[in-house]
Image (cartoon, rainbow, N blue to C red):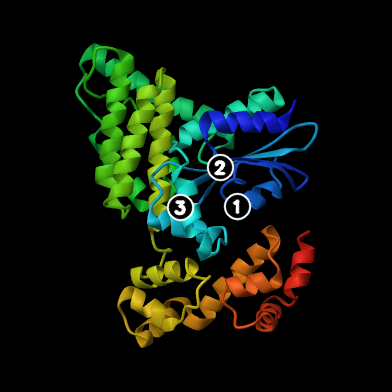
């Protein structure tokens, strides 16, 4: 097979970004016409240990990685998003991939030119690519970190059976308490707890009203109502951005309308609930921390490529520097300046491992006063020099 020709054609058909690597050497990249470099997240997938993977960077950016059996080529699909690219997403993407501010306009045009796609459909693309490249059916949902496919189908079957029973026998609704518990678990932002709840509820005979003339239309109408209520009663009260919530509801409704089986709609119920729950969790403060300290931490982590100080952090939450210093000491037992340095050094480790940036470039990107100062504080923190750390990872 001519793999480069395959990638070129696939990119032309769906307009999703593609990259092809052979033992770390790039053979093809649809980025080439837009960006002079590959994003850092691509390097993590290329040099990672898993042969076939799906990951989400932050809460919105999706990547997939497929290893071609026989020759070890790695095809990277992504980035892709299931919501419009906002200023926040753009800023996070630049930070995650260590992209200089000078590329902001070019990157904006590149990301906004990628079509929106749901988690569900993105995974289908990966499934199809795996079939084309390796000639075998993949266990798609087993690669989806939230739940194996058989578990999802079990939940879907139980839910669909309840719908059909309600239609045929006109049984009164009994979903109220189940739904209230569901919203509570989603609002809590813990996918693990939500999964446990859904597992425990998989044998319930949920009885919903008759809202359509056919089982398929019934399932779609129920899904549309469910995902809307999840957004309004769980996601927004849980702290998710209002516009992001509405965009997700719209996306999942469109995805549902394209489905043709009850099992697929049932699976989408599960995926959408877990998606909202994970996004809320990404926005929540770590357990035991105040909202103000959590906001400070988020600000620091997303601005490590800037010369930030305690005064910048304090201004972000509208407090004094002395107040922020006191809160950090009480809740984290660490000085704010030390925490800023810790975050910069942790990002330096990632850049040393997954990028080919020189020590001087990393030092400049993370706003150290000099390369020698960067090397000194890195060795003091980790016991080895940045160059030694990079060699250990190769």
Q: Residue at x 33, y 31 (%)?
A: 253
In this rendering, position of residue 70 left or right of residue 152: right
For the question of whether residue 4 can be seen, the reply is: yes
For the question of whether residue 197 can be seen, the reply is: no
Q: Secondary structure at mark 2?
A: strand
Q: Nearer the viewer, mark 3 or mark 1?
A: 3
Q: Are circles 1 and 2 on residues that touch, CB within 8 Å?
A: yes
Q: Secondary structure at mark 1?
A: helix
Whole-number angstrom distance, CA of label 3 to CA of label 2: 15 Å
Q: Secondary structure at mark 3?
A: helix
Q: Residue at x 54, y 37 (%)?
A: 144
Whole-number angstrom distance, CA of label 1 to CA of label 2: 10 Å
Q: Residue at x 38, y 32 (%)?
A: 269
Q: Quadrant of the C terminus?
A: bottom right
Q: Earlier in the sequence, mark 1 or mark 2?
A: 1
Q: Nearer the viewer, residue 142 or 355?
A: 355
Residue 265 disc label: none
Q: Residue at x 70, y 83 (%)?
A: 372
Task: Determine crowd level at label 1: few under 14, some 14-19, many 20+ residues with C-alpha closer than 10 A.
Answer: many
Task: Determine crowd level at label 3: few under 14, some 14-19, many 20+ residues with C-alpha closer than 10 A.
Answer: some
- Badge 1 is on which residue? 41
- Badge 3 is on which residue? 108
- Badge 2 is on which residue? 78
Please determine whether, in this image, residue 215 is positioned above or below residue 235.
above
């Amino acid at each position: 097979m001519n793999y480069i020709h395959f990638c070129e054609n696939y990119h032309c058909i769906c307009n999703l970004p593609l990259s092809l690597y052979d033992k770390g050497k790039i053979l093809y990249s649809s980025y080439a016409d837009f960006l002079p470099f590959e994003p850092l997240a691509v390097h993590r997938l290329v040099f990672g240990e898993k042969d076939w993977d799906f990951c989400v960077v932050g809460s919105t950016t999706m990547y997939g990685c497929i290893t071609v059996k026989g020759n070890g080529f790695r095809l990277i699909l992504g980035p892709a998003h299931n919501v419009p690219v906002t200023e926040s997403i753009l800023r996070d993407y630049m930070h995650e991939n260590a992209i200089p501010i000078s590329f902001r306009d070019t990157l904006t045009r590149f990301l906004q030119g990628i079509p929106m796609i749901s988690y569900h459909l993105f995974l289908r693309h990966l499934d199809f690519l795996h079939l084309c490249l390796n000639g075998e059916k993949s266990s798609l949902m087993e690669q989806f970190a939230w739940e194996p496919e058989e578990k999802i189908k079990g939940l879907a079957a139980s839910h669909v059976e309840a719908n059909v029973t309600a239609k045929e026998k006109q049984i009164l609704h009994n979903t109220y308490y189940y739904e209230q518990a569901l919203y509570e678990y989603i609002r809590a932002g813990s996918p693990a707890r939500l999964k446990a709840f859904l597992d425990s509820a998989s044998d319930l005979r949920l009885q919903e009203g008759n809202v359509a003339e056919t089982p398929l239309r019934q399932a779609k109408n129920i899904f549309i109502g469910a995902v809307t209520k999840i957004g309004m009663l769980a996601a927004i009260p849980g702290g998710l951005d209002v516009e992001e919530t509405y965009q997700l509801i719209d996306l999942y409704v469109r995805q549902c309308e394209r489905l043709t089986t009850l099992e697929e709609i049932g699976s989408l119920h599960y995926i959408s609930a877990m998606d909202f729950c994970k996004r809320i969790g990404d926005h929540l403060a770590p357990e035991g921390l105040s909202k103000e300290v959590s906001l400070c931490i988020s600000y620091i982590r997303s601005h490590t490529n800037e010369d930030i100080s305690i005064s910048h952090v304090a201004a972000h939450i509208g407090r004094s520097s002395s107040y922020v210093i006191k809160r950090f000491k009480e809740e984290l037992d660490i000085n704010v300046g030390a925490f800023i340095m810790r975050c910069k050094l942790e990002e330096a480790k990632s850049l040393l491992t997954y990028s080919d940036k020189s020590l001087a470039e990393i030092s400049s990107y993370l706003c150290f006063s000099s390369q020698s100062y960067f090397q000194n504080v890195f060795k003091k923190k980790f016991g080895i020099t940045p160059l030694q750390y990079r060699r250990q990872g190769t």
